[in-house]
Image (cartoon, rainbow, N blue to C red):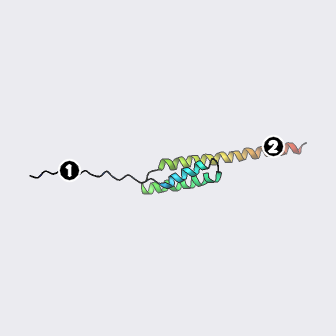
Amino acid sequence: MPRVTPVPSKPPPTPQFNSMALVAFALSVLGIFVLPSALGGVVCGHLARRQIRRTGEQGDAWALAALILGYLLLLLSIAGLLVFGGVMITMFGVMSFM
């Protein structure tokens, strides 16, 4: 009887990493210095999460981090503009009475 040697099986292929998720995260981090890129990070983050759900790729955590950071930066910038506007209105209001 011939001896049969088992053939090692190949491991299952690992899912690809979604590059849009990395782009979204990079844009959100860049949004710290250049605000419009935070908006690009939010858009790319949503697109990346949709692609990840559809294809089963990896990178959902990166896309989620991009969304959180992008929305946080947009919220902080809007709050800063409101505070700045309030200070300016107050300053001009005080100056008008002098």
Tell me which label, 2 or 1, sits earlier in the chain: 1
Q: What number of labels is visible?
A: 2
- The amino acid at mark 1 is Pro
Q: Is residue 44 visible?
A: yes
* The label number, if any, that marks residue 57 in the structure image: none
Is residue 45 in view? no
Q: Residue 19, how many percent across, how many down? A: 49, 55
| Residue at 15 percent of width and 51 percent of height | 4
Q: Give the camera-side residue of 27 and 88.
A: 27
Q: Which quadrant holds residue 16?
A: bottom left
Most extreme residue toward the left is 1
The answer to whether residue 2 is left or right of residue 97 is left
- Amino acid type at mark 2: Thr
Residue 83 rendering spot, x and y as whole percentages: 73, 44
Q: CA distance from mark 2 to mark 1?
A: 82 Å
**Percent coordinates x, y for residue 9 in the rendering:** 26, 51
Query: What secondary structure is marked by label 1?
Result: loop
Q: Position of residue 51 (x, y in %)?
A: 47, 57
- Quadrant where the C terminus lies? top right
Q: Is label 2 in a helix, a strand or a loop?
A: helix
Q: In this rendering, which labeled residue sits more in front, label 2 or label 1?
A: 1
Report which residue position mark 1 lands on.
Answer: 6
Q: Nearer the viewer, residue 69 or 54?
A: 69
Mark 2: give few (<14), some (14-19) or many (20+) Cα within 10 Å: few
Along the viewing direction, whichever of 65 and 92 lies nearer the viewer: 65
* Left or right side of 88 for 97: right
Residue under pointer 2: 90
16 to the left or right of 48: left
- The residue lying at 44 percent from left, 51 percent from top is 58
> How many residues crowd around disc 1 within 10 Å: few (fewer than 14), some, or many (20 or more)?
few
What residue is shown at x 76% (from left), y 47% (from top)? Answer: 85
Using the image, determine if residue 94 lies above or below residue 54: above
